[in-house]
Amino acid sequence: MSSLGVEQGVVIADSEPPRGNRSRYAFACAILASMTSIILGYDIGVMSGAAIFIKDDLKLSDVQLEILMGILNIYSLIGSGAAGRTSDWIGRRFTIVLAGAFFFCGALLMGFATNYPFIMVGRFVAGIGVGYAMMIAPVYTAEVAPASSRGFLSSFPEIFINIGILLGYVSNYFFSKLPEHLGWRFMLGVGAVPSVFLAIGVLAMPESPRWLVLQGRLGDAFKVLDKTSNTKEEAITRLDDIKRAAGIPDDMTDDVIVVPNKKSAGKGVWKDLLVRPTPSVRHILIACLGIHFAQQASGIDAVVLYSPTIFSRAGLKSKNDQLLATVAVGVVKTLFIVVGTCVVDRFGRRALLLTSMGGMFLSLTALGTSLTVIDRNPGQTIKWAIGLAVTTVMTFVATFSIGAGPVTWVYCSEIFPVRLRAQGASLGVMLNRLMSGIIGMTFLSLSKGLTIGGAFLLFAGVAAAAWVFFFTFLPETRGMPLEEMESLFGSYTANKKKNSVSKDNEIVDEQ
């Protein structure tokens, strides 16, 4: 492409689109990519309330209910494992369409289910879509967004997950008024509707510029970068950085080129990630897996999936009160996700993670203590303990949502080198979904074995260990261009000297 190099500097001033238009275009791309997350969040949230009615209607045992609640995340491992290779093969955009197709089929199957095996088939199909969606949405957004707003835009999937969870809770409340055998089917089946709009909307999205470069389509990549960068100079710089990271010589500037040593389908990536990683890649992989493990092992899905059960054990007896309190959880979670998203590029990833995990530890400790007091005084109404339990459920989801919720996806979508990003991110998502599935499928049994208060005190211990891990191991990445991210890693510590590089490279968003 003859206009990519120095010659392009001549035309920079010609009819350059206003900066606001560029920002809005990247914003629109992030929203469309994140729409899969609404469907995912709805599926998670709606099951918390639907489970009450499914258990009564299909006469399920506690073990069957646990498996039904958590198995979606185990099934999602298939989608997560395939998502990296699939997105390198067909592109990020069509992988999002594929995720939507799985969601559509899974929701219909669950909505029309007549027995336990039937609904499990629906969970299996939807679970594959979950795996695809959770990996591809943050990766696509990180690759499209300019560095100055990457944290903000990459948090969108988590915002939309929480909007979906809230919609699921609201759906539970309203459809609970229907006859029992119809209510839960409407709750689950209506999740198919947004998938249709998702498939249509995604067709308006551009492909990831980094994927286009890996395919040798430099002309198409520059067009996307030009629309999503703050200035045309930044678009040129971003393209040069991507070419350098992909091993493409600077003198190759045609619209379409043959990429040297092309590995776009993921060939050799697993060896570079797992068999012979460099110190930097090994540090990155450990950081990604550690943050995903901590996010789920600290118990967020126990609260999201079993909120009505927790409120029942805390002293709220009617199903209506339990569902209303669960809706309040969804509102708090969504509001604080928005707060976290708005400040992630201002305060940085580390500060939000440490603040979040510290608040989660305090909330879980207080929640476990209050539930233990209630559990040891059966038949008594201990108002302060009930109030503390309900309050700390809210503070737990609030502190989770300002940091551990959105930053996990931002951090892990931006730290891998471009050629390893899809598969590296998919490994993190696989561990995330595995831990989520384990928590979902064992929480009722765990709360019987340790008591429900003991289960949350165990989660508090995980949160404390995670805080130490974050403090000692994770470097700050705010403002660092994706192609230079690897330079922050390799020492296996949160190296303060290296962290200062990110501040020097930060792109200030001038208004």
Image (cartoon, rainbow, N blue to C red):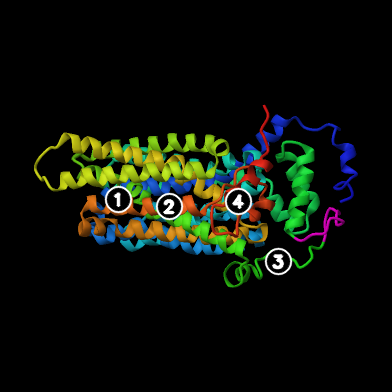
371 sits to left or right of 261: left
Determine whether the residue tagged by mark 4 lies in a helix, strand or loop.
helix
Q: State the residue in front, 223 or 269.
A: 269
The residue at which mark 4 appears reads as: 414
Question: Residue at left 86%, top 51%?
Answer: 1
Does residue 378 appear left or right of residue 14 in this picture?
left
- Near-viewer residue (291 or 64): 291
The kind of residue on which mark 2 rests is Val
User: At which x and y percent is residue 198?
Assistant: 56, 45
According to the picture, the residue beneath numbered tag 1 turns out to be: 51
Compared with residue 133, is residue 193 higher up or lower down, i.e. above or below? above
Instruction: Name the mark on residue 63.
Output: none
Local packing at callout 3 (Cα closer than 10 Å; few below 14, some 14-19, many 20+) is: some
First to last magenta residue range: 247-257
Look at 34% across and 63% down and name the residue there.
Answer: 117
- What SS does tag 2 mark? helix
CA separation in Å, label 1 and label 2: 36 Å
